[in-house]
Image: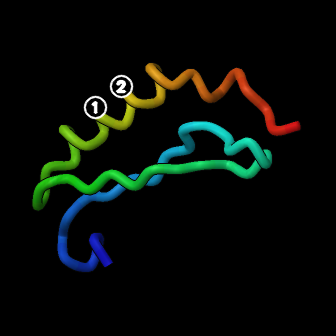
Amino acid sequence: MWNVCGNPAASLPVGFARSGLPIGVQLVGRLHDDPTLMALAAQVEQARGWTDHWPP
């Protein structure tokens, strides 16, 4: 939906629930402002450190 409207959007994994299911967040940027959204997505990925974790 957001891409059809011209807004950039990104979906990121941010962790796992107690049940082991992955939890994600969707970020939506301002119209045609891809660089800001990608910078924010990179910051969230770095802060959450999800790449080091695996579900049980």
Q: What residue is pinned by disc 1?
A: 39
Residue 4 located left or right of residue 53: left
Q: Nearer the viewer, residue 38 or 46?
A: 46
The quarter in which the N terminus is drawn is bottom left
Q: Amino acid at mark 2?
A: Gln
For image coordinates 44% across by 20% down, the residue present is: 47
User: Is residue 20 depicted above or below 30 in this figure?
Assistant: above
User: Is residue 6 depicted above or below 26 in this figure?
Assistant: below
On the image, the x and y values in percent for residue 20 come to: 79, 45
Q: Nearer the viewer, residue 18 or 2?
A: 18
Residue 17 located left or right of residue 32: right
Alpha carbon of mark 1 to alpha carbon of mark 2: how far?
6 Å
Graded by Cα atoms within 10 Å as few (under 14), some (14 to 19) or many (20 or more), the crowding at tag 1 reads few
Q: Pointer 1 and pointer 2: residues touching (CB < 8 Å)?
A: yes
Q: Nearer the viewer, mark 1 or mark 2?
A: 2
Q: What residue is pinned by disc 2?
A: 43
On the image, the x and y values in percent for residue 2 come to: 28, 71
